[in-house]
Amino acid sequence: MAEVVQTTQLRDALAWATNEPEPKHEASSNPFIWFWEAVEGDFNENRTTGQIMVDAGISMIPLIDQVCDIRDLIADCKKIGKAPADSWAWVSLLLTLIGLFPSLGSLAKGVLKIFFAFMRREGGLAVENALNAAMTWVITFLRRRDVQVFLKSKQVDEVFQWLADELKSLRGKIDTATVMAAFDRAIKVLDTLSSRVNAIPFISAKAKAAIEQVKSVRQVADKHIGAALQPTQRRVDAVIAKLELQILTKQHAIVDTANIHYRGVIPESHAIALMRKRKPGYLSSAGDRFHRPVEAANARQLVDRMSSLRDAKGNTRKPADQFPTLNNQSIASFHTLRANAIHGPARLYRIISPSSRGMSDCWISEEIFRKLQSAPDPKEAWRRHLGVWPDWNANGQFVTYDVKAGETLNTWAGMAASQTKQGLPEHDLEGGWEQIVFNLPKGDARADTVAYFNKNAKKESLGKSITQAEVDVLTASMNSQQKTLFFEKHLAIREKINHPSISGPFETGWGYTDFEGAGFSGKIGLPALPGQLTNGAAR
Protein backbone atom coordinates (compact mmCIF):
# COMPACT_ATOMS: atom_id res chain seq x y z
CA MET A 1 0.00 0.00 0.00
CA ALA A 2 1.33 3.41 -0.95
CA GLU A 3 2.30 5.77 1.86
CA VAL A 4 0.24 8.70 0.52
CA VAL A 5 -2.48 8.30 3.14
CA GLN A 6 -3.08 11.63 4.83
CA THR A 7 -3.33 11.35 8.61
CA THR A 8 -6.22 13.82 8.90
CA GLN A 9 -8.26 12.05 6.22
CA LEU A 10 -7.60 8.67 7.77
CA ARG A 11 -8.43 9.94 11.26
CA ASP A 12 -11.80 11.33 10.08
CA ALA A 13 -12.66 8.20 8.13
CA LEU A 14 -11.81 5.70 10.83
CA ALA A 15 -13.43 7.70 13.60
CA TRP A 16 -16.82 7.02 12.07
CA ALA A 17 -16.20 3.27 12.05
CA THR A 18 -15.40 3.10 15.76
CA ASN A 19 -17.11 3.98 18.99
CA GLU A 20 -14.75 6.90 19.41
CA PRO A 21 -15.62 9.74 16.97
CA GLU A 22 -13.49 12.03 19.17
CA PRO A 23 -10.19 10.28 20.01
CA LYS A 24 -9.13 10.46 23.64
CA HIS A 25 -5.58 11.38 22.72
CA GLU A 26 -3.74 12.90 19.83
CA ALA A 27 -3.00 10.29 17.22
CA SER A 28 0.45 9.71 15.83
CA SER A 29 1.46 11.55 12.68
CA ASN A 30 2.15 8.13 11.17
CA PRO A 31 -1.14 7.11 9.43
CA PHE A 32 -0.37 3.41 9.88
CA ILE A 33 0.05 3.80 13.62
CA TRP A 34 -3.28 5.69 13.65
CA PHE A 35 -4.92 2.80 11.82
CA TRP A 36 -3.84 0.24 14.39
CA GLU A 37 -4.80 2.58 17.22
CA ALA A 38 -8.28 2.95 15.69
CA VAL A 39 -8.95 -0.77 15.32
CA GLU A 40 -8.48 -1.28 19.05
CA GLY A 41 -12.11 -0.38 19.76
CA ASP A 42 -15.15 -2.46 18.91
CA PHE A 43 -16.91 -1.89 15.61
CA ASN A 44 -20.01 0.27 16.07
CA GLU A 45 -22.93 -1.65 14.53
CA ASN A 46 -25.40 1.01 15.65
CA ARG A 47 -23.90 3.91 13.82
CA THR A 48 -26.05 6.99 13.38
CA THR A 49 -27.50 7.78 9.98
CA GLY A 50 -24.95 10.58 9.67
CA GLN A 51 -22.12 8.12 10.24
CA ILE A 52 -23.59 5.75 7.66
CA MET A 53 -23.74 8.58 5.13
CA VAL A 54 -20.09 9.49 5.79
CA ASP A 55 -19.18 5.83 5.40
CA ALA A 56 -20.94 5.77 2.02
CA GLY A 57 -19.16 8.96 0.99
CA ILE A 58 -15.80 7.42 1.86
CA SER A 59 -16.42 4.90 -0.92
CA MET A 60 -15.66 7.73 -3.35
CA ILE A 61 -12.11 8.06 -1.88
CA PRO A 62 -10.31 4.90 -3.09
CA LEU A 63 -7.37 4.63 -0.68
CA ILE A 64 -9.25 5.67 2.46
CA ASP A 65 -12.11 3.42 1.37
CA GLN A 66 -9.79 0.40 1.19
CA VAL A 67 -8.41 1.04 4.67
CA CYS A 68 -11.93 1.37 6.13
CA ASP A 69 -13.01 -1.87 4.46
CA ILE A 70 -10.11 -3.62 6.15
CA ARG A 71 -11.27 -2.10 9.45
CA ASP A 72 -14.73 -3.62 8.85
CA LEU A 73 -13.15 -6.98 8.00
CA ILE A 74 -11.22 -7.04 11.28
CA ALA A 75 -14.42 -6.19 13.18
CA ASP A 76 -16.36 -9.00 11.44
CA CYS A 77 -13.62 -11.51 12.23
CA LYS A 78 -13.53 -10.42 15.89
CA LYS A 79 -17.27 -11.05 16.09
CA ILE A 80 -16.94 -14.48 14.48
CA GLY A 81 -14.09 -15.29 16.86
CA LYS A 82 -16.47 -14.71 19.79
CA ALA A 83 -19.38 -16.66 18.21
CA PRO A 84 -18.21 -18.93 15.36
CA ALA A 85 -21.68 -20.52 15.00
CA ASP A 86 -23.46 -17.17 14.53
CA SER A 87 -24.80 -17.45 10.95
CA TRP A 88 -25.62 -13.73 10.74
CA ALA A 89 -21.98 -12.91 11.62
CA TRP A 90 -20.87 -14.90 8.56
CA VAL A 91 -23.43 -13.10 6.37
CA SER A 92 -22.12 -9.79 7.74
CA LEU A 93 -18.59 -10.88 6.77
CA LEU A 94 -19.77 -11.68 3.25
CA LEU A 95 -21.39 -8.25 2.96
CA THR A 96 -18.02 -6.72 3.85
CA LEU A 97 -16.12 -8.94 1.39
CA ILE A 98 -18.50 -7.97 -1.44
CA GLY A 99 -17.29 -4.41 -0.91
CA LEU A 100 -13.78 -5.66 -1.68
CA PHE A 101 -14.69 -7.03 -5.12
CA PRO A 102 -12.46 -5.20 -7.62
CA SER A 103 -15.31 -4.99 -10.16
CA LEU A 104 -17.55 -3.00 -7.80
CA GLY A 105 -17.59 0.68 -8.71
CA SER A 106 -17.27 3.35 -6.03
CA LEU A 107 -20.80 4.73 -6.36
CA ALA A 108 -22.48 1.32 -6.36
CA LYS A 109 -20.33 0.47 -3.36
CA GLY A 110 -21.49 3.59 -1.53
CA VAL A 111 -25.13 2.68 -2.14
CA LEU A 112 -24.52 -0.88 -0.94
CA LYS A 113 -22.84 0.46 2.19
CA ILE A 114 -26.05 2.30 3.08
CA PHE A 115 -28.29 -0.69 2.44
CA PHE A 116 -25.95 -3.10 4.24
CA ALA A 117 -25.57 -0.76 7.23
CA PHE A 118 -29.34 -0.63 7.69
CA MET A 119 -29.54 -4.41 7.31
CA ARG A 120 -26.96 -4.82 10.07
CA ARG A 121 -28.88 -2.36 12.23
CA GLU A 122 -32.26 -4.06 11.71
CA GLY A 123 -30.86 -7.57 12.12
CA GLY A 124 -30.72 -10.61 9.91
CA LEU A 125 -34.45 -11.14 9.28
CA ALA A 126 -35.87 -7.63 8.97
CA VAL A 127 -34.73 -7.11 5.38
CA GLU A 128 -37.83 -5.27 4.20
CA ASN A 129 -37.72 -2.82 7.12
CA ALA A 130 -34.03 -2.18 6.42
CA LEU A 131 -34.65 -1.53 2.72
CA ASN A 132 -37.47 0.90 3.41
CA ALA A 133 -35.41 2.77 5.99
CA ALA A 134 -32.34 2.89 3.75
CA MET A 135 -34.04 4.09 0.56
CA THR A 136 -34.56 7.67 1.77
CA TRP A 137 -30.87 7.94 2.64
CA VAL A 138 -29.78 6.37 -0.63
CA ILE A 139 -31.66 9.15 -2.42
CA THR A 140 -30.06 11.73 -0.13
CA PHE A 141 -26.63 10.27 -0.91
CA LEU A 142 -27.28 10.39 -4.65
CA ARG A 143 -28.12 14.10 -4.39
CA ARG A 144 -24.67 14.93 -3.05
CA ARG A 145 -22.75 17.30 -5.26
CA ASP A 146 -19.74 14.98 -5.69
CA VAL A 147 -22.06 12.10 -6.61
CA GLN A 148 -23.87 14.27 -9.15
CA VAL A 149 -20.52 15.27 -10.67
CA PHE A 150 -19.57 11.59 -10.89
CA LEU A 151 -22.87 10.66 -12.56
CA LYS A 152 -22.44 13.46 -15.06
CA SER A 153 -18.93 12.26 -15.91
CA LYS A 154 -20.33 8.78 -16.55
CA GLN A 155 -23.25 10.22 -18.57
CA VAL A 156 -25.74 8.37 -16.37
CA ASP A 157 -29.28 9.43 -17.24
CA GLU A 158 -31.33 7.01 -15.10
CA VAL A 159 -29.34 6.45 -11.94
CA PHE A 160 -31.56 3.76 -10.36
CA GLN A 161 -31.52 1.64 -13.50
CA TRP A 162 -27.78 2.14 -13.81
CA LEU A 163 -27.25 1.08 -10.20
CA ALA A 164 -29.56 -1.92 -10.59
CA ASP A 165 -27.62 -3.03 -13.67
CA GLU A 166 -24.31 -2.58 -11.84
CA LEU A 167 -25.52 -4.72 -8.96
CA LYS A 168 -26.98 -7.37 -11.28
CA SER A 169 -23.53 -7.72 -12.80
CA LEU A 170 -22.06 -7.99 -9.29
CA ARG A 171 -24.76 -10.48 -8.22
CA GLY A 172 -23.56 -13.00 -10.80
CA LYS A 173 -20.10 -12.99 -9.22
CA ILE A 174 -21.12 -13.72 -5.64
CA ASP A 175 -19.78 -17.23 -5.34
CA THR A 176 -17.37 -19.01 -3.03
CA ALA A 177 -14.31 -18.63 -5.26
CA THR A 178 -14.76 -14.86 -5.77
CA VAL A 179 -15.52 -14.23 -2.11
CA MET A 180 -12.47 -16.17 -0.93
CA ALA A 181 -10.26 -14.39 -3.47
CA ALA A 182 -11.44 -11.05 -2.02
CA PHE A 183 -10.67 -12.37 1.47
CA ASP A 184 -7.12 -13.33 0.43
CA ARG A 185 -6.51 -9.93 -1.20
CA ALA A 186 -7.64 -8.24 2.01
CA ILE A 187 -5.21 -10.33 4.06
CA LYS A 188 -2.35 -9.18 1.78
CA VAL A 189 -3.33 -5.56 2.45
CA LEU A 190 -3.42 -6.32 6.17
CA ASP A 191 0.08 -7.79 5.98
CA THR A 192 1.28 -4.59 4.29
CA LEU A 193 -0.35 -2.41 6.95
CA SER A 194 1.24 -4.55 9.66
CA SER A 195 4.69 -4.38 8.11
CA ARG A 196 4.65 -0.58 8.46
CA VAL A 197 4.53 -0.84 12.26
CA ASN A 198 6.71 -3.91 12.91
CA ALA A 199 9.35 -1.90 14.76
CA ILE A 200 6.91 0.02 16.94
CA PRO A 201 6.36 -1.47 20.41
CA PHE A 202 2.84 -2.22 21.53
CA ILE A 203 1.32 -1.21 18.16
CA SER A 204 3.02 -4.13 16.40
CA ALA A 205 1.46 -6.52 18.94
CA LYS A 206 -2.00 -5.14 18.17
CA ALA A 207 -1.40 -5.59 14.45
CA LYS A 208 -0.16 -9.12 14.91
CA ALA A 209 -3.17 -10.08 17.05
CA ALA A 210 -5.63 -8.65 14.54
CA ILE A 211 -4.01 -10.45 11.61
CA GLU A 212 -3.95 -13.73 13.52
CA GLN A 213 -7.68 -13.32 14.22
CA VAL A 214 -8.48 -12.64 10.55
CA LYS A 215 -6.32 -15.52 9.32
CA SER A 216 -7.89 -17.93 11.81
CA VAL A 217 -11.32 -17.04 10.41
CA ARG A 218 -9.95 -17.48 6.89
CA GLN A 219 -8.79 -21.00 7.76
CA VAL A 220 -12.33 -22.13 8.65
CA ALA A 221 -14.17 -19.90 6.19
CA ASP A 222 -14.52 -22.68 3.59
CA LYS A 223 -16.82 -24.53 6.01
CA HIS A 224 -19.12 -21.53 6.58
CA ILE A 225 -19.07 -19.33 3.48
CA GLY A 226 -21.17 -21.75 1.43
CA ALA A 227 -24.03 -21.64 3.93
CA ALA A 228 -23.89 -17.84 4.07
CA LEU A 229 -23.89 -17.36 0.29
CA GLN A 230 -27.61 -17.82 -0.31
CA PRO A 231 -28.84 -15.40 2.39
CA THR A 232 -26.24 -12.88 1.20
CA GLN A 233 -27.35 -13.26 -2.41
CA ARG A 234 -30.97 -12.81 -1.31
CA ARG A 235 -30.05 -9.52 0.33
CA VAL A 236 -28.35 -8.26 -2.81
CA ASP A 237 -31.39 -9.40 -4.81
CA ALA A 238 -33.60 -7.45 -2.41
CA VAL A 239 -31.49 -4.32 -2.95
CA ILE A 240 -31.76 -4.70 -6.74
CA ALA A 241 -35.53 -5.16 -6.49
CA LYS A 242 -35.83 -2.06 -4.30
CA LEU A 243 -33.89 0.03 -6.81
CA GLU A 244 -36.04 -1.26 -9.67
CA LEU A 245 -39.19 -0.52 -7.71
CA GLN A 246 -37.91 3.02 -7.22
CA ILE A 247 -37.61 3.32 -11.03
CA LEU A 248 -41.25 2.34 -11.45
CA THR A 249 -42.45 4.61 -8.66
CA LYS A 250 -40.45 7.58 -9.88
CA GLN A 251 -41.51 7.25 -13.49
CA HIS A 252 -44.99 5.82 -13.47
CA ALA A 253 -46.63 6.05 -10.06
CA ILE A 254 -49.93 7.73 -9.37
CA VAL A 255 -48.79 9.61 -6.30
CA ASP A 256 -50.80 11.91 -4.01
CA THR A 257 -53.79 11.88 -6.33
CA ALA A 258 -56.93 13.27 -4.67
CA ASN A 259 -59.33 12.41 -7.48
CA ILE A 260 -58.86 9.83 -10.21
CA HIS A 261 -60.81 10.11 -13.45
CA TYR A 262 -61.85 6.73 -14.74
CA ARG A 263 -62.84 5.77 -18.24
CA GLY A 264 -64.02 2.19 -18.27
CA VAL A 265 -64.08 -0.38 -21.04
CA ILE A 266 -66.20 0.22 -24.13
CA PRO A 267 -69.31 -1.96 -24.47
CA GLU A 268 -68.65 -4.77 -26.93
CA SER A 269 -71.09 -3.50 -29.56
CA HIS A 270 -69.43 -0.06 -29.54
CA ALA A 271 -65.97 -1.61 -29.65
CA ILE A 272 -66.86 -3.75 -32.69
CA ALA A 273 -68.36 -0.75 -34.52
CA LEU A 274 -65.26 1.37 -33.82
CA MET A 275 -62.86 -1.41 -34.87
CA ARG A 276 -64.75 -1.89 -38.14
CA LYS A 277 -64.61 1.82 -38.83
CA ARG A 278 -61.05 2.60 -37.71
CA LYS A 279 -59.28 -0.75 -38.31
CA PRO A 280 -56.67 -0.38 -35.52
CA GLY A 281 -53.21 -1.80 -36.09
CA TYR A 282 -53.65 -4.61 -33.60
CA LEU A 283 -56.20 -6.38 -35.84
CA SER A 284 -54.82 -9.16 -38.03
CA SER A 285 -54.52 -8.87 -41.77
CA ALA A 286 -54.00 -11.32 -44.62
CA GLY A 287 -50.99 -13.57 -44.06
CA ASP A 288 -50.79 -13.11 -40.28
CA ARG A 289 -50.33 -16.28 -38.28
CA PHE A 290 -53.32 -17.77 -36.45
CA HIS A 291 -52.45 -19.39 -33.12
CA ARG A 292 -55.14 -22.00 -32.62
CA PRO A 293 -56.38 -22.33 -29.00
CA VAL A 294 -55.55 -25.41 -26.98
CA GLU A 295 -58.49 -27.81 -26.89
CA ALA A 296 -59.68 -27.96 -23.30
CA ALA A 297 -60.56 -31.65 -23.63
CA ASN A 298 -56.98 -32.45 -24.67
CA ALA A 299 -55.39 -30.53 -21.78
CA ARG A 300 -57.88 -31.32 -19.05
CA GLN A 301 -56.16 -34.50 -17.85
CA LEU A 302 -52.78 -32.73 -17.46
CA VAL A 303 -54.29 -29.70 -15.71
CA ASP A 304 -56.38 -31.77 -13.32
CA ARG A 305 -53.44 -34.02 -12.46
CA MET A 306 -51.05 -31.11 -11.80
CA SER A 307 -53.60 -29.12 -9.79
CA SER A 308 -54.96 -32.05 -7.76
CA LEU A 309 -54.57 -31.98 -3.99
CA ARG A 310 -53.85 -35.73 -4.04
CA ASP A 311 -51.59 -37.96 -6.12
CA ALA A 312 -52.61 -41.12 -8.00
CA LYS A 313 -52.32 -43.15 -4.77
CA GLY A 314 -54.55 -40.79 -2.83
CA ASN A 315 -51.74 -39.24 -0.80
CA THR A 316 -51.85 -35.51 -0.05
CA ARG A 317 -49.50 -33.62 -2.37
CA LYS A 318 -47.16 -30.97 -1.05
CA PRO A 319 -48.13 -27.36 -1.90
CA ALA A 320 -44.86 -27.07 -3.84
CA ASP A 321 -46.11 -29.81 -6.20
CA GLN A 322 -49.54 -28.27 -6.81
CA PHE A 323 -50.28 -26.04 -9.79
CA PRO A 324 -53.26 -23.69 -10.20
CA THR A 325 -56.63 -24.94 -11.38
CA LEU A 326 -57.71 -23.77 -14.86
CA ASN A 327 -61.21 -23.56 -16.29
CA ASN A 328 -61.87 -24.30 -19.96
CA GLN A 329 -61.81 -20.63 -20.88
CA SER A 330 -58.36 -20.17 -19.34
CA ILE A 331 -57.04 -23.27 -21.13
CA ALA A 332 -58.39 -21.98 -24.45
CA SER A 333 -56.52 -18.67 -23.97
CA PHE A 334 -53.29 -20.61 -24.65
CA HIS A 335 -51.88 -21.77 -27.96
CA THR A 336 -49.29 -23.87 -26.11
CA LEU A 337 -49.53 -24.84 -22.46
CA ARG A 338 -46.99 -26.05 -19.91
CA ALA A 339 -46.64 -26.22 -16.14
CA ASN A 340 -44.15 -23.51 -15.22
CA ALA A 341 -42.43 -23.16 -11.81
CA ILE A 342 -40.97 -19.67 -11.37
CA HIS A 343 -38.05 -19.54 -8.94
CA GLY A 344 -37.34 -16.21 -7.27
CA PRO A 345 -36.09 -13.66 -7.53
CA ALA A 346 -38.40 -12.87 -10.44
CA ARG A 347 -40.88 -10.14 -11.29
CA LEU A 348 -44.16 -10.55 -13.16
CA TYR A 349 -46.29 -7.80 -14.68
CA ARG A 350 -50.04 -7.42 -15.16
CA ILE A 351 -51.68 -4.76 -17.35
CA ILE A 352 -54.84 -3.43 -15.71
CA SER A 353 -57.37 -0.59 -15.68
CA PRO A 354 -58.83 1.15 -12.61
CA SER A 355 -61.62 -1.45 -12.60
CA SER A 356 -59.31 -4.46 -12.94
CA ARG A 357 -58.23 -6.52 -9.99
CA GLY A 358 -54.53 -6.29 -9.21
CA MET A 359 -54.48 -9.96 -8.20
CA SER A 360 -56.02 -11.96 -11.01
CA ASP A 361 -55.10 -14.67 -13.49
CA CYS A 362 -53.19 -13.14 -16.41
CA TRP A 363 -49.55 -12.00 -16.13
CA ILE A 364 -46.45 -11.60 -18.27
CA SER A 365 -42.74 -11.93 -17.57
CA GLU A 366 -40.33 -9.03 -17.20
CA GLU A 367 -38.88 -9.96 -20.60
CA ILE A 368 -42.27 -9.64 -22.31
CA PHE A 369 -43.04 -6.40 -20.47
CA ARG A 370 -39.78 -4.87 -21.69
CA LYS A 371 -40.57 -6.14 -25.18
CA LEU A 372 -43.92 -4.36 -25.03
CA GLN A 373 -42.44 -1.11 -23.76
CA SER A 374 -39.81 -1.10 -26.52
CA ALA A 375 -42.42 -1.64 -29.27
CA PRO A 376 -43.28 1.34 -31.53
CA ASP A 377 -46.82 1.25 -30.08
CA PRO A 378 -46.80 -0.70 -26.77
CA LYS A 379 -50.59 -0.76 -26.36
CA GLU A 380 -51.07 -2.01 -29.91
CA ALA A 381 -48.45 -4.75 -29.35
CA TRP A 382 -50.15 -5.75 -26.09
CA ARG A 383 -53.59 -6.12 -27.66
CA ARG A 384 -52.28 -7.86 -30.77
CA HIS A 385 -49.73 -10.33 -29.38
CA LEU A 386 -51.42 -11.12 -26.05
CA GLY A 387 -54.95 -11.18 -27.46
CA VAL A 388 -56.75 -8.49 -25.42
CA TRP A 389 -59.88 -6.91 -26.92
CA PRO A 390 -60.64 -3.25 -26.00
CA ASP A 391 -63.96 -4.26 -24.41
CA TRP A 392 -62.06 -6.62 -22.06
CA ASN A 393 -59.45 -4.32 -20.57
CA ALA A 394 -59.08 -0.56 -20.85
CA ASN A 395 -55.39 -0.67 -19.75
CA GLY A 396 -53.60 2.46 -18.53
CA GLN A 397 -51.97 0.88 -15.48
CA PHE A 398 -49.88 -2.10 -14.45
CA VAL A 399 -48.90 -3.87 -11.24
CA THR A 400 -45.91 -6.04 -10.44
CA TYR A 401 -45.74 -9.34 -8.56
CA ASP A 402 -42.38 -10.15 -6.95
CA VAL A 403 -41.38 -13.75 -6.37
CA LYS A 404 -38.80 -13.40 -3.62
CA ALA A 405 -35.43 -15.14 -3.60
CA GLY A 406 -35.88 -18.65 -2.25
CA GLU A 407 -39.58 -18.72 -3.17
CA THR A 408 -41.22 -20.69 -6.01
CA LEU A 409 -44.48 -19.76 -7.73
CA ASN A 410 -46.25 -22.49 -9.69
CA THR A 411 -47.94 -21.16 -12.82
CA TRP A 412 -49.09 -22.13 -16.30
CA ALA A 413 -47.29 -20.55 -19.22
CA GLY A 414 -47.29 -20.65 -22.99
CA MET A 415 -47.99 -18.73 -26.16
CA ALA A 416 -51.23 -16.73 -26.14
CA ALA A 417 -53.89 -18.04 -28.52
CA SER A 418 -55.42 -15.91 -31.25
CA GLN A 419 -58.74 -14.32 -30.27
CA THR A 420 -61.81 -14.01 -32.50
CA LYS A 421 -65.15 -12.17 -32.32
CA GLN A 422 -68.40 -13.04 -34.04
CA GLY A 423 -68.88 -9.43 -35.08
CA LEU A 424 -65.43 -9.33 -36.73
CA PRO A 425 -65.25 -12.52 -38.81
CA GLU A 426 -62.57 -11.09 -41.11
CA HIS A 427 -60.15 -10.19 -38.29
CA ASP A 428 -58.65 -11.59 -35.10
CA LEU A 429 -56.01 -10.77 -32.50
CA GLU A 430 -52.87 -12.68 -33.47
CA GLY A 431 -51.52 -13.75 -30.05
CA GLY A 432 -48.22 -15.64 -30.00
CA TRP A 433 -46.37 -13.98 -27.12
CA GLU A 434 -45.92 -15.77 -23.81
CA GLN A 435 -48.54 -15.31 -21.11
CA ILE A 436 -48.48 -16.59 -17.52
CA VAL A 437 -51.56 -17.65 -15.57
CA PHE A 438 -52.00 -18.39 -11.86
CA ASN A 439 -54.76 -17.70 -9.38
CA LEU A 440 -55.79 -17.68 -5.74
CA PRO A 441 -58.33 -19.98 -4.10
CA LYS A 442 -61.80 -18.46 -3.79
CA GLY A 443 -62.09 -16.43 -0.60
CA ASP A 444 -58.33 -15.99 -0.18
CA ALA A 445 -57.62 -12.95 2.01
CA ARG A 446 -54.92 -11.80 -0.42
CA ALA A 447 -57.50 -11.12 -3.14
CA ASP A 448 -58.39 -7.51 -3.96
CA THR A 449 -61.17 -5.69 -2.15
CA VAL A 450 -63.64 -4.49 -4.79
CA ALA A 451 -66.40 -1.89 -4.47
CA TYR A 452 -69.41 -1.72 -6.81
CA PHE A 453 -70.73 1.74 -7.62
CA ASN A 454 -74.18 2.47 -8.99
CA LYS A 455 -73.75 4.43 -12.22
CA ASN A 456 -75.60 7.69 -12.67
CA ALA A 457 -75.44 8.23 -16.41
CA LYS A 458 -77.22 11.58 -16.33
CA LYS A 459 -74.83 13.11 -13.81
CA GLU A 460 -71.78 11.20 -15.09
CA SER A 461 -70.98 10.35 -11.49
CA LEU A 462 -71.03 7.38 -9.17
CA GLY A 463 -73.62 6.63 -6.57
CA LYS A 464 -73.30 4.77 -3.28
CA SER A 465 -70.99 1.76 -3.30
CA ILE A 466 -71.73 -1.78 -2.15
CA THR A 467 -69.31 -4.56 -1.24
CA GLN A 468 -68.56 -7.80 -3.06
CA ALA A 469 -70.36 -9.73 -0.31
CA GLU A 470 -73.48 -7.59 -0.80
CA VAL A 471 -73.31 -8.14 -4.56
CA ASP A 472 -73.06 -11.89 -4.06
CA VAL A 473 -76.23 -11.85 -1.96
CA LEU A 474 -78.13 -9.63 -4.40
CA THR A 475 -77.24 -11.69 -7.47
CA ALA A 476 -77.55 -15.16 -5.91
CA SER A 477 -81.16 -15.65 -7.04
CA MET A 478 -80.90 -13.73 -10.33
CA ASN A 479 -81.05 -15.38 -13.73
CA SER A 480 -78.37 -14.63 -16.35
CA GLN A 481 -80.37 -11.80 -17.93
CA GLN A 482 -80.93 -10.12 -14.58
CA LYS A 483 -77.26 -10.46 -13.67
CA THR A 484 -76.23 -8.89 -16.98
CA LEU A 485 -78.53 -5.93 -16.34
CA PHE A 486 -77.25 -5.56 -12.78
CA PHE A 487 -73.59 -5.40 -13.83
CA GLU A 488 -74.39 -2.97 -16.63
CA LYS A 489 -75.73 -0.58 -14.00
CA HIS A 490 -72.86 -1.06 -11.55
CA LEU A 491 -69.20 -0.27 -12.01
CA ALA A 492 -66.68 -2.49 -10.20
CA ILE A 493 -63.69 -0.52 -8.90
CA ARG A 494 -60.56 -1.87 -7.26
CA GLU A 495 -60.81 -0.53 -3.72
CA LYS A 496 -57.69 -2.12 -2.23
CA ILE A 497 -54.85 -4.42 -3.34
CA ASN A 498 -54.22 -6.87 -0.51
CA HIS A 499 -51.56 -9.23 -1.84
CA PRO A 500 -48.21 -8.52 -0.10
CA SER A 501 -46.21 -9.44 -3.21
CA ILE A 502 -47.97 -6.93 -5.47
CA SER A 503 -46.80 -3.35 -5.99
CA GLY A 504 -48.63 -0.63 -7.87
CA PRO A 505 -50.61 0.47 -9.71
CA PHE A 506 -48.16 2.28 -11.95
CA GLU A 507 -49.05 4.08 -15.15
CA THR A 508 -48.18 2.38 -18.43
CA GLY A 509 -47.94 5.70 -20.23
CA TRP A 510 -50.24 4.30 -22.93
CA GLY A 511 -53.30 6.28 -21.86
CA TYR A 512 -56.60 4.98 -20.49
CA THR A 513 -58.69 4.92 -23.65
CA ASP A 514 -58.82 3.50 -27.16
CA PHE A 515 -60.00 5.33 -30.28
CA GLU A 516 -59.04 8.73 -28.78
CA GLY A 517 -61.74 8.38 -26.15
CA ALA A 518 -64.58 7.66 -28.59
CA GLY A 519 -67.40 5.64 -27.07
CA PHE A 520 -67.27 7.35 -23.67
CA SER A 521 -69.78 9.89 -22.50
CA GLY A 522 -67.28 11.56 -20.20
CA LYS A 523 -65.06 11.19 -17.18
CA ILE A 524 -66.24 9.68 -13.91
CA GLY A 525 -64.51 11.11 -10.86
CA LEU A 526 -63.44 8.46 -8.37
CA PRO A 527 -62.49 8.88 -4.73
CA ALA A 528 -58.83 8.31 -3.87
CA LEU A 529 -59.27 4.65 -2.95
CA PRO A 530 -56.15 2.86 -1.65
CA GLY A 531 -56.31 0.39 -4.55
CA GLN A 532 -56.05 3.27 -7.00
CA LEU A 533 -52.95 4.80 -5.41
CA THR A 534 -49.47 3.38 -5.74
CA ASN A 535 -48.13 1.13 -3.02
CA GLY A 536 -44.73 -0.55 -2.95
CA ALA A 537 -43.83 -4.04 -1.82
CA ALA A 538 -40.21 -5.14 -1.34
CA ARG A 539 -39.10 -8.38 -2.91
Image (cartoon, rainbow, N blue to C red):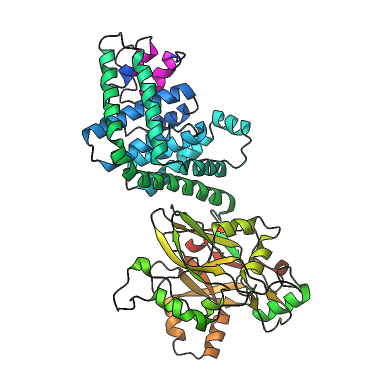
Residue at image x 72%, y 77%? Answer: 427
Identified at 48% across, 72% down, the residue is 451
Furthest-left residue in this view: 82
Drawn side of residue 218 relative to residue 158, left or right: left
**Quarter of image, res 518:** bottom right
Residue 53 spot, x, y in % from top left: 44, 32
Q: What range of the chain is rendered magenta?
A: 7-35
Judge whether residue 355 can be spotted in this image. Answer: no
Q: Is 255 located above or below residue 453 in the figure? A: above
Residue 89: % across, % down: 29, 38
Instruction: Give whichever of 245, 217 is nearer the camera.
Output: 217
| Residue 487 visible to the viewer | yes
The N terminus, quarter of image = top left
Q: Is residue 81 left or right of residue 456?
A: left
Q: Position of residue 279 (x, y in %)?
A: 76, 72
| Residue shown at the point (32%, 71%) measured from the top left | 317
Q: How many marks?
A: 0
